[in-house]
Amino acid sequence: MSAFLVENAPVIAVAVSLLSLVFSFYLIRYILRQDPGNEEVQQLSRSIQEGARTFMGREFQYLALFGVVVAVLLFLMPKTGLPTTVGFVVGTIASGLAGWIGMWIATKSNGRTAHAAQHSFSKALNIAYSGGATMGFTVVGMGLLGLSLVYLGFPEHSHAWLGYAFGSSAVALFLRVGGGIYTKSADVGADVVGKVEAGIPEDDPRNPGVIADNVGDNVGDVAGMGSDLYESYVSAIAATMFLGKEIDFTSTFPNLGYEELGLKLAFLLGVAGILASIIGYFFVSAEEGGDVSYEQQAANARSALNRGTTVANVLAGGLIIGVIVLVIPGGASAAEVISDAQAGLDVRWALFLAMLTGLVTGVIIGKATEYYTSENSPVKSIASAAQTGAATTIIEGLGTGLLSTVVPALAVGAATIFAFYLGGLFGIALASLGMLVTLGVVLSTDAYGPITDNAQGISEMAGLGTAVRERCEALDSVGNTTAAIGKGFAIGSAALAALAWLATYFSEAAAQNLLSLEAGVNLMNPAVLVGILLGAMITFYLASIGIHAISRGAASVVTEVRRQFDEIEGVRSGDTTPDYTTCVDIATSAALREMMIPGIVVLVAPVLVGVLPGLGVEALAGLLTGVLVTGFLTAIFMSNAGGAWDNAKKYIESGVHGGKGGKAHAASVVGDTVGDPLKDTAGPSLNVLIKLMGKVAVIFLPLFAYLVG
Amino acid sequence: MSAFLVENAPVIAVAVSLLSLVFSFYLIRYILRQDPGNEEVQQLSRSIQEGARTFMGREFQYLALFGVVVAVLLFLMPKTGLPTTVGFVVGTIASGLAGWIGMWIATKSNGRTAHAAQHSFSKALNIAYSGGATMGFTVVGMGLLGLSLVYLGFPEHSHAWLGYAFGSSAVALFLRVGGGIYTKSADVGADVVGKVEAGIPEDDPRNPGVIADNVGDNVGDVAGMGSDLYESYVSAIAATMFLGKEIDFTSTFPNLGYEELGLKLAFLLGVAGILASIIGYFFVSAEEGGDVSYEQQAANARSALNRGTTVANVLAGGLIIGVIVLVIPGGASAAEVISDAQAGLDVRWALFLAMLTGLVTGVIIGKATEYYTSENSPVKSIASAAQTGAATTIIEGLGTGLLSTVVPALAVGAATIFAFYLGGLFGIALASLGMLVTLGVVLSTDAYGPITDNAQGISEMAGLGTAVRERCEALDSVGNTTAAIGKGFAIGSAALAALAWLATYFSEAAAQNLLSLEAGVNLMNPAVLVGILLGAMITFYLASIGIHAISRGAASVVTEVRRQFDEIEGVRSGDTTPDYTTCVDIATSAALREMMIPGIVVLVAPVLVGVLPGLGVEALAGLLTGVLVTGFLTAIFMSNAGGAWDNAKKYIESGVHGGKGGKAHAASVVGDTVGDPLKDTAGPSLNVLIKLMGKVAVIFLPLFAYLVG
């Protein structure tokens, strides 16, 4: 049994990831069978779908161009050229496909959710959650499937898996960074001309930018978030494979009977997580409310969603213990089996606890995020500061955002030390996998939020009436809590995944004789210190680029919306449908233009630091550390400050401090507007960038070895 | 000659620092001989003096308490107890005295400057500049004098010098961190009740908080800035002594004829800098303008101030070359003489170039600060963003602040690598000394600004008329350019000084066998990585504390100002002089209360990290690195964002985008208000904290050795 499991682990992984994909096809069929609603809803849905297609089309056009250039460069690398390139191409396609499917089904679900909300709360919830789950199971299915196939194709070439992970980074770069810029450019651009200049309400179909804005919600929270977590997921498995293959289990267990146990373990753990997630899905059933209020129904639904995640996590824990007990013989301590581990604990328990460490870290970061961004004392302080104006609102929010980094930093710090103690560098990779192994069900809940958000927008634009709007709002409120936790989860998983890449970098550099694992990377070498400084600076620089990009991107949209109002007859009066697609196209082009510089910086900086005289491989380790540490904290700061301002505004709108329309509300709107580019563009971009740099560093190690040799 | 110089270097240092102090007494006499102005000016001046006395008195009361506690703790340290304690006590007294004198003379100069401005522009400038120079020469005089005396008292105990430097940190903690909180609490508190609630103009004598606010200008920019730079200056010399004593010149130059050359060099370089600064002072002569406009006179004065600094720097360069050539024999390369240096260059040139590196870095950071905060394209972009409201103003400013870290980070990075290449860790200490050696004249110019600022306030409150106000404004404009450069200089010097302490930490930990200089501090040790993460987190945490402290501090002032308006008859109408002193006292108490937590964190965190299981001496190196890197960048971000918002407001007030009172102006006021706590409290506090942590780490090394051993 155990020999069968280990030897066929990649094949089992192929089978289970296909199962995950089949499951998501089943969900897609369920959604498509639902009533798409009346003509107006369908028309709006179609506009959003067309806009999403335009956005994705243009993104992928440039992604393809970028992919070809990168593929050629990778192919030219000494020794590792071919496998890296094949892995990269497969990874880009798999990740791109997952993003496409996620976006497509989200735009199919929102109109149907709005329509279903006319008749049944639980039906609407089911459709929205199924839309999210399609994304979730497509992501983990594609992620594990591609990685297994690439491994089966190149079992001896670790650079093939690396290339695969790098491909998912490329897609995340376009959908998370580019998508983040797109979202806010469209949002701000549409608002400036619509609300401020033309004086028409938000989400008014007369505004040529309104569809671009609606598409943006899907781009940021579905495609962006999805590709980000896809990358983290693939990173966690690939890093576990990398670090697992270095462990020689057979020296401690000579009668083991199978090889590459550490590496194969990565596949089996991924399999356990997917199976647990699928089962978890079926525990999310929304009961028909009957007589109870929407609030009560929403509360029921919320606990149903939580139940799914909890069941999946507990089940995954059980399956993981089962896998570990089956394939790893007991009786030896972690320190005996793994050269850099220190724990005297049985290796089975040590590895399980390392994974658990990651899971607990994820929960702590999520809860901390929820505390600082939900209706608790920090948000209430911001709302209270809003009474004395915009300046105090901003100051209070900045202070809150900075303060909110403390607990996550302590959690990640403790996890790092603990996981390393338990399993060495491999333990760190396992911690990141522990956090991400049930991504299927976690992402289902995350992607549910934006679908209900869009459904609410459609119900408003199509004038479905107050009752439907209220039902959609209740649906949306379910998503809000999980969304806050989801944001923290995305940042935390990015940090752990980046940490796993740093561990991989150390291990691979040592394997290529560029570093000695014993002598290590000396912090007293000023090049290392300067590397850390440059890494921290790059974080600040990329954040500034993300912030500035919005101003320029929005300006392009403003020009186009103004042009349509002025030049196309009937748009202003509502007699002619505006040219929504051109607005989407222009916002997309602006986003692609603005992501050029951060993209180039992230790809070129590690290579430059690696080859420049006076710097080198050790300085590059410093650079990765600096980027990781400050990128992680800055992402939390920006995400939580933005979230806190957002909810302070909502809190005031609930009737406190003068309520909507009062002076405090005006100040809170300023806070919310300042927070938007921080939480939706600059912050999330850092997730992708800290992971990407680690991969670039590992990929280019052969080049550094070639130059040194 | 050379043997005489080296052997008597500390005595020469005593003599020259006494000369510096005599020079500042001469300046004090000059100022006190000037006409203190009419009764109203004198009355206001007296109120400010009394307020300053109240502030300083209360600060020193707590400082004394804090000092006694710390002295007792230091005394209990194994082995190094007595010398550290003596050094600490002397250092605290010397630094406190310098701060007291600086504050006192600043409050004596401002009324006299205002009075002189009634008759002569150049006379007013002379008084203000002499006031600044009193501060400058007291600081360098006291700094070098105390350090030399402590060395003469304990020539064998390096911990005595360390204790001395630590004493200056304690004072900086109270005057820069506490003072920063005081300044903004008083400012915001006075404005909230005065301008917003009571509707009386700024700087109105009826406002009970107005003197607290005026005292605050002196606290922040004179006492705070002075104590910060005092600490950097002492740090640079002390670190040079520490790292210099490790260099064995006699092994390369057996016929040298004198010992401890590296250590003694620190004194001689300090002496060269003071002499050059004193001579530089005499090149700052403001010619009587005659018929030319105030603007023209201001421009003349500005170039006179710059001339002083330039002359002092060139002269210092010449003197330093002279000293080096006299005391270090040529003919051996830096790499031969200094074990961790790499340069093949003659050691004389290498050491001079290392110092020059620091000076150039200071200039680059100053110029970058000037670019981002003066009327250039970044400030104009913020002003232009103000046209679309407060939110865009804030976003643009945040982006600018983050972007402004790039050049300083590159400059410090290059300087670190270059200085280490030239002179090893000793080279890094020399770089920080190179930046600070002419502090006497640099600080003169820095402290000139707030004096003219206060003079302007007094002329307004005393109603001296438009002509005088214009003259004072012209005087003030001279200070503004130099102030921007000065702020960058303070941050840059703090970074280099902190770097020098990090180098000292490495060197001392190695000397005490807690680290091996060869094996070093391994970044692949997760404890080190976690140390860096914790360091970065502490920076964010301290920044959040600094920001939040203002809200609470201001609230205390608001309550007191309201009480006086309500309870004391005649205050509102102006018939009774308000109780200014109580407001000062309350703001000071609030500041002291608010600085408790950051003070404790900075003192306790390094010790905790050093002794906690799983962390330790290597993790502490990581902590120092994390704090240094992110503290440096965050200080620049906050200082420059604040400066840019400030000047965007001034730019709009000059008549652009609707000028004063327009919508853009209102938005720019929000930006300025947000920037205030960043640039005047949170940012500058980080300067002190990054230097302080390095010292705490070195001081507690014997404790760690004791625990390990």
Image (spheres, coloured by chain):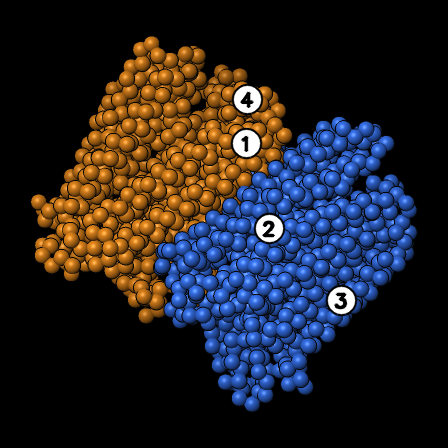
Chain colours: A blue, B orange
- The number of callouts visible is 4
Discs 3, 2: same chain: yes
Q: Nearer the viewer, residue B273 or B17?
A: B273
The residue to which callout 4 is attached is B656
* Position above or below: A499 against A263: above
Q: Nearer the viewer, residue B496 or B224?
A: B496
* Position above or below: A388 against A444: above
Write the residue at 62% across / 40% down: A550
* Of marks 3 and 2, the one in the foreground: 3
Q: Nearer the viewer, residue A287 or A48?
A: A48
Write the residue at 53% across / 88% down: A254
Secondary structure of the residue carrying tag 3 is helix
**Type of amino acid at the residue the image marks with label 3:** Leu
Structural distance between the alpha carbons of marks 3 and 1: 50 Å
Q: Chain of mark 4?
A: B
**Type of amino acid at the residue the image marks with label 2:** Ser
Structural distance between the alpha carbons of marks 3 and 4: 60 Å
The residue to which callout 3 is attached is A21
**Type of amino acid at the residue the image marks with label 1:** Ser
Structural distance between the alpha carbons of marks 4 and 1: 12 Å
The residue to which callout 1 is attached is B381
Q: Is residue A649 left or right of residue B78?
A: right
Q: Position of residue B441 (x, y in %)?
A: 28, 33
* Crowd class of label 4 (few under 14; some 14 to 19; many from 20; radius 10 Å): some
